[in-house]
Image (tube, grey):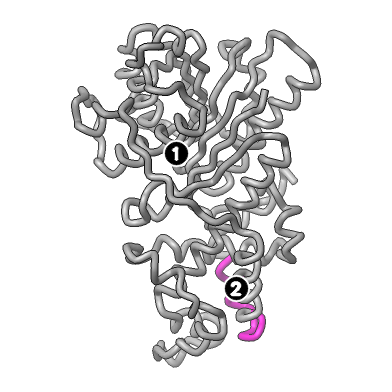
Amino acid sequence: MAGVAAVTSAAKRASVHKLSEEEFWALVAKIRSAHAAAAVQMRESYIALDACDKWMKGQVDRNVPYQEKHVVQQVSIMGNMETFGLLPRGGAEDATKEIALKNAPAVVEFGAGRGYLTQMLADCYGIKNIFLVERRSYKLKADRSLRQNEGVKLERLRIDIEDLSLRGVKALSGSQYLAIGKHLCGPATDMTIMCCLHELHNRTEEKGHDKHHLRGLALATCCHHLCQWKHYANKAFLSGLGIAEEEFHAMTWFSSWAVDGDHSSQDSLESEDSSSEVIRNRVTEKPDPEIVGVERIIRGIPGVERSALGFMCKDVIDTGRLLWLRSKGLDADLVSYVPSDVSPENHLLMAKCRS
């Protein structure tokens, strides 16, 4: 499958618009049915622990630009990681600091961008061994600030996640590591969990004592509209729900509707009146008469109903990832880590190895 070209958003859109009206409504009904039958109930888990208190109060020397909403997101990611057991209780300032640091894992941040998430992790939890995976070059990186932390070892890996083998990273050899990522766009989430689980299974099979191994992961997913069938981790889950490749790509395209517009009222998205039949009856707007077929139907669906369908698609896609991790023997959880008015991209996928 490696040579299969990515399906563009334009191609996904064109495929949906080619559906007949009956096929379109049947697809909407199938998505709703799949969500009701299989999607995990998204639990709100907005956590701000004392370990990140200085960041929440702005008591840090910020040499790179930050936005408050990003601090809120990163603090909650770390709070969830600590609560889930991926980080030591109390952070780097805890009374057990020395023990925590001796047992502290390395951190591999996938899709690291400028590395702000890892910078906060280093500040709050004393992480010293850091690997930042990013295919692009960025200005205003956190690297300089990270290297000013005493004892920090930092390595940037300029590579596409799809091409990465952690076995080739010599500085990681012999270490436990946490895989993290904030807003891993589309298939990057699938590539990351495949990369980490591939490494885990290779280590298990080889019984190597000098190999690194995964302790756990925490990935904030995003940009589901970019997801690709060829990379998706749990095709069997979707197939079991009767969702084939073209329907999956339609779902990914619909998922963009979740991040369009105002998401301050989650209650409106959970309405029992959001059935495909009711949505069909609510198509009351009168778009351009020259626009016909499915495109005309879509333009006439109220924004809140489109948004609700988009969130359902995101839930189903991330549920498949969650179940795939569990099927590989990991303890895993999927939570909403910030309110949707902070970011509608608010799913956090976590997993930890049992041994």
Magenta stretch: dominant secondary structure = helix
Q: Which amino acid does label 1 sit on?
A: Lys
Corner quadrant of residue 67: top left
Query: Dot 2: within a 10 Å radius of its alpha carbon, few (fewer than 14), some, or many (20 or more) residues?
Result: many
Q: Position of residue 73 (x, y in %)?
A: 35, 41
The structure residue drawn at horizontal position 60% and vertical position 75%, both measured from the top left corner, is 28
> Which secondary structure, mark 1?
strand
Residue 23 seen by the camera = yes
Corner quadrant of residue 119: top left
For residue 20: magenta?
yes
Q: Where is residue 92 in the image (x, y as percent from the top left)?
A: 36, 17
Q: In which quarter of the image is the C terminus?
A: top right
For residue 249: magenta?
no
Q: Which amino acid does label 2 sit on?
A: Val
Dot 1 or dot 2, earlier in sequence: 2
Depth order, front residue of 171/274: 274
Q: Position of residue 258 (x, y in %)?
A: 44, 63
Vertical position of residue 192 compared to residue 97: above or below: below
Depth order, front residue of 260/342: 342
Vertical position of residue 265 compared to residue 275: above or below: above
The structure residue drawn at horizontal position 35% and vertical position 30%, both measured from the top left corner, is 116
Q: Which residue has dot 2 on it?
A: 16
- Of discs 1 and 2, which sits in the foreground? 1
Extent of the magenta region: 12-23
Left or right position of 40 against 283: right
Q: Which residue has dot 1 on it?
A: 182
